[in-house]
Image (cartoon, rainbow, N blue to C red):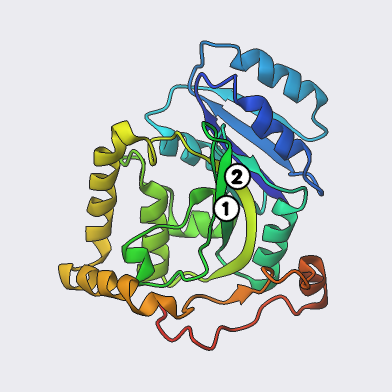
Amino acid sequence: MTTSIITPTWNRAHVLPRMLASVESQVPLPCEHILMDNMSSDSTEQVLRDYSARAPYPVHHVRAMDTGIYDAMNKGAALARGEALYFLNDDDTLLASDSLYTMAALLQNTRSDFVFADVMVIDPATHTSRRRSHRQVNRHTLAEKSICQQAMLFGAEAFRRYGNFDASLRAAADYDWVLRTLLTKRAKAAYLAHAVAGFYLGGISNDVQHKAVFDAEMQSVRSRYYTPADQSLARSYRRTWRKVPYGLTFVPTSHPAVDVKSYLRLGKNIIPNPLAWIGF
């Protein structure tokens, strides 16, 4: 399965090399890397020119004005020719050389619309990290918290079928896309209990200065799909029943004895979670 990586960027030349190195380390390599550049005025153009010269896959540096990160992502998706789409922010990274392969193999083998995994949340100020797990995702947990964008790989066909990100949103369009597809379109998703990406703190979704704006937008999106009664039930669920491992189908790769590639290769890649009775 071929994968297109799409990266929106704007005046972030100082963090691009870290992200680019993680893409170059992938085995197998992506089929292309599309970088949607909102007319950067720093050294981004030179960084990407050097990257394009050495990369063994097509690098498309698109300099064009956009109305925000999701507008850039939508435009990148429209240009992509891969069978899968991965949106990687300019300051984030793929954690291991098989991150893309593992997600793509899961997407293909399960015939899902999208797959999601875990991420490592990294604080560059303190050089500390913590794992953000998505193992308990269901309709109740999603009423409270989204799936991290960096944890998701989308089928290109599913992205076309269910529509683009809502570009009118500034920071929660990926949350809206997940709720729209899972709750109203009955999309199929699969979970991989494995950390695939490094999510660096500092963006609008975790910037203290913008927290009130982000929280308000999340609530606005939440209210599109959940009634006040639903949200109240979800809060109760998170305080009590979420201790039980409800969730979607998953690959049990958190156990050190499990070989991810063997599971995928041998067709033993998915096992049902018997406690996933709160579904979509």
Task: Give the x, y percent position of residue 258.
Answer: 77, 72
Q: Is residue 81 above or below residue 1?
A: above
Picture residue at 43% right of the left edge, 49% below the top: 164
From the top left corner, tell me how far across and down residue 141 is, in percent.
37, 68
Identify which residue, 55 or 185, lies in the foreground. 55
- Residue in front for this viewpoint, 245 or 222: 245
- Say which quadrant the N terminus sits in: bottom right
Residue at screen point 20% across, 70% down: 232
What's the CA distance linking mark 2 and mark 1?
Answer: 6 Å
According to the picture, the residue beneath numbered tag 1 turns out to be: 119
Q: Quadrant of residue 54?
A: top right
Q: Amino acid at mark 2?
A: Gly
The residue singled out by tag 2 in the image is: 198
239 or 42: nearer the viewer: 239
In the rendered image, which quarter is residue 257 located in?
Answer: bottom right
Asked if the residues shown at circle 2 and circle 1 are in contact, with their CB atoms under 8 angstroms apart, the answer is: yes
Task: Classify 10 Å Cα crowding around label 1: few (below 14), some (14-19), many (20 and above).
Answer: many
Q: Earlier in the sequence, mark 2 or mark 1?
A: 1
- Left or right placement of residue 258 versus residue 175 in this view: right
